């Protein structure tokens, strides 16, 4: 489970690194291309050299395109989508949360109402969102409580809801929960919810929070059915 959570952070780090490397390579490439074009302009009477410089410029452009593709692939927003059954995906998430829940005497209640409903999604990433939300809920109830995991579907939208009977959030916490690096936990990264929001929005969906002190927390993600 920790490995799955670490993947979200690793993917973001890879994305940042790829963007940095791409920048470092693209700048000298554009100098190489500029200089080659300059030389090319002076080689009117050497057809073979001119032809070779044309090849050089074409290769530089090809390299530039491959870097663009690499960047697309490594960007955190990159999704590998397939058709995913909503209930089965959520049940997989719950199975992974079970031992952590047991360790904190948290009782999990499941209700699946999206039978035969599918979403077009990056299964691993949506699973990571479910785990992020579930872990937060369990961490909010160190002395036990209830975790309700629910799927609900209407004609257009699948809603996955994670609700806990923990302490809930004060308004000043609620206001900041999606800010990267905002955390109230000594060992927290403050990235779980901001990354979850990013992943859900990359899917064209939305995430909503309902929480107040003493009333627990409900976080729901809404995704278009396909
Ligand atoms: P982290 O878990 O590392 O702190 P998150 O972005 O996942 O990072 O959460 C940010 C903050 O939002 C948490 O530190 C906590 O204060 C609050 N929070 C998130 N989920 C819950 C929850 N289920 N109950 C109470 N507070 C929560």
Image: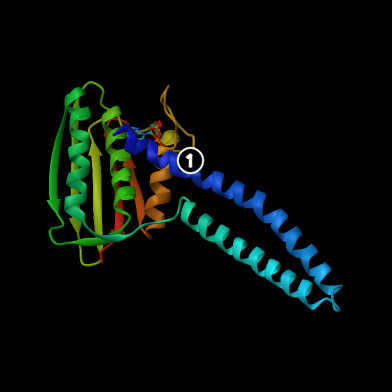
Q: Is residue 17 above or below residue 169?
A: below
Mark 1, other Cα within 10 Å: few <14 / some 14–19 / many ≥20: some
Tally of numbered discs? 1
Residue drawn at point x = 80 percent, y = 71 percent: 40
Residue drawn at point x = 17 percent, y = 38 percent: 95
Q: Is residue 35 above or below residue 94?
A: below
Percent of width and height locating residue 152: 19, 55
Who is closer to the viewer here, 77 or 153?
A: 77
Who is closer to the viewer here, 171 or 62?
A: 62
Disc 1 target residue: 179
Residue 212 visible within the image = no
Percent of width and height locating residue 47: 79, 78
Q: Is residue 3 left or right of residue 152?
A: right
Quadrant showing the N terminus:
top left
Q: Is residue 50 left or right of residue 74?
A: right
Q: Secondary structure at mark 1?
A: loop
For ligand 1, which image quadrant applies? top left
The part of the image, by quadrant, that contains residue 116 is bottom left
Q: Is residue 113 left or right of residue 131?
A: left
Quadrant showing the C terminus:
bottom left
């Amino acid at each position: 489970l920790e490995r799955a959570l670490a993947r979200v952070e690793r993917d973001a780090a890879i994305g940042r690194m790829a963007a940095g490397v791409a920048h470092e390579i693209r700048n000298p490439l554009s100098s190489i291309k500029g200089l080659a074009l300059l030389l090319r302009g002076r080689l009117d009477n050497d057809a073979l050299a001119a032809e070779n410089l044309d090849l050089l410029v074409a290769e530089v452009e090809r390299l530039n395109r491959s870097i663009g593709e690499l960047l697309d692939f490594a960007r955190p927003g990159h999704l590998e989508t397939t058709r995913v059954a909503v209930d089965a995906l959520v049940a997989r998430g719950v199975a992974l949360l079970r031992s952590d829940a047991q360790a904190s005497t948290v009782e999990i209640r499941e209700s699946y109402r999206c039978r035969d409903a599918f979403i077009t999604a990056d299964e691993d990433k949506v699973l990571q969102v479910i785990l992020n939300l579930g872990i937060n809920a369990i961490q909010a109830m160190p002395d036990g409580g209830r975790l309700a995991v629910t799927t609900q579907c209407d004609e257009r939208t699948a809603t996955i809801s994670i609700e806990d009977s923990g302490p809930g959030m004060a308004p000043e916490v609620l206001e900041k929960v999606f800010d990267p690096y905002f955390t109230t936990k000594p060992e927290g990264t403050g990235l779980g919810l901001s990354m979850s929001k990013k992943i859900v929005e990359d899917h064209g969906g939305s995430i909503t929070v309902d929480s107040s002190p003493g009333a627990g927390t409900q976080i729901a993600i809404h995704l278009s059915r396909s």
